[in-house]
Structures are given as C-alpha cells and as structure tokens.
Image: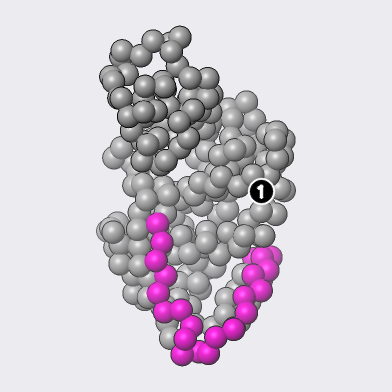
Amino acid sequence: DRALRRHQLPSRYYSTEASSQGQFGHWRDLITDQLQPDYVRLVQWLYEIIHTPLLASSQRLVDIKYHQKVAEMGFNMRLSRSLSLAALNQLFASQGIELNLQQQMSQQSLWRYLRGEIDLVYEHEGRYYVVDYKSNYLGNTFDAYHTAALAQSMSEHRYWLQAAIYQVALHRFLQLRLPHYDINTHLGAVEYAFIRGMSPNYAAHGRLVWQPDSEFILALDALFGADIDFS
C-alpha cells in the first residue's frame, strides 16, 4: 500500500478502504473479505508478470536472486563530437532497422550526453541480460501482444535505438567489472517486456528479444565515443 501511495495510484487499488486513507496496518492482519476487488486483480496481474518466463533465459522475474541483478542501473554517456546521425542510420540499416534520424541541429548543438536507467540487468549462467519494461497498450487480449505487433511498436517508438544504447552501456560496464570479459561470452540479449501482454499461459506473447551481433555493438560503441559513468 505504501508503494501504491508513492506511485499515486487511485484509491480503489489499495488493499482496503482504510489503507487508501493512509491507515496502514500489517499485512498479516488483512482479512480477505475486506480486500478491494481492484486490489485483488492488481495483485493477480503482478503475480502473472513475475511468474512469466523471460524468453532470453527462461528465468522468471520472481526467481532472479538479489545478488544476480541490478534494478534501475543508471549511466551517463558522453558522445563523440564527431557523432553522425547519418552513420547511425546506416549502421542500423545494416541490421534491417530504419531509424531515419534527421540532422535538424547544427553539428555544434548535437547532443553531447546520454543519460539513462536500465530497468533491469541480471546474470544467468555467466551471461548478462537487459530487461526493459513497457506498459504500451496494444489491445484488450493477450493475442494482441504477439511478436509482430511488438516489433511494430518497437519501430514506431524507436525502441531499437534505446535497446542498442542499453547494450553498449552494459558492454562498457562489463568491460570495467569482469576481469576476463568477452563480448560473445558474457553479453546476453536485451528483452522488452510488454507487461500488459505477459502471462505464463501465453508462452510467446508480451516479450521481444533482440541479440545484436557483437560487430554491431562494437561499431556503435565506437560511434558514441569512449566516456561513460555509472550510478
């Protein structure tokens, strides 16, 4: 309930009417008959999300141990002064992805820094994966969250660029932290979890995995330049 208050959810999603008014008790004292219907549905939905296997590793979110993950890993990446949007477009086109970024500013005013947070980085069997959560609404049924629909949403919102930035950030992080880092051995896929379409009953829905080849990541790394900080 305190988390719901921090995120300013409507009162109907709190466990009880008393909780919605700020009167928080201990969860052991909750009486099932007093639970609000929308709270029950919210808990059931979250339960399904965390018990849905991720496609990249077959791990469920609920099974990933604390020492195996970093949530909301922040990074600041300084970009090269010679960064070219045309070169970015060409590099992504080599992967069959059309970015169509436009050089609308002078070279002097092109962005110099990227600041971001990766929703989840986790390790499984020696490989490190990125998970990004999306709440995009694609339809009322799980069938609306099939792979082709997710890929279309990725293109419409340019999430491919975001995913690649996260891969470069994680690549650089692992270079700093792992003594014998090898990009082909340790860098896992990036997975976009469209949470509205996630359910253990729909094995191939609601999640999209992208594993760019190492040559692409290294080329993008070189385009961006060398400096990055982590938080």
Q: Measured from the top left, where is residue 170 in percent x and y?
A: 40, 59
Q: Residue at x 70, y 40 (%)?
A: 139
- Residue count near mark 1 (Cα–Cα under 10 Å), binned few <14, some 14–19, many ≥20: many
Residue 101 painted magenta: yes
Could you tell me the amino acid type at mark 1?
A: Leu
Quadrant of image for the N terminus: top left
Please, which colouring scheme is shown? one colour
Q: Nearer the viewer, residue 162 or 157?
A: 157
Residue 107 painted magenta: yes
Instruction: Tell me if residue 48 comes above or below residue 133 in the rendering.
Output: above
Q: Residue at x 43, y 27 (%)?
A: 14
The residue tagged with tag 1: helix, strand or loop? helix
Q: Residue at x 41, y 20 (%)?
A: 16
- State the image quarter where residue 198 is shown: top right
Q: Measured from the top left, where is residue 89 in percent x and y?
A: 62, 75
What kind of secondary structure does the magenta stretch mostly adopt? loop
Give the magenta-colored segment's residue range.
93-117
Q: Measured from the top left, where is residue 187 in percent x and y?
A: 44, 55
Instruction: Tell me if residue 193 comes above or below residue 80 in the rendering.
Output: above
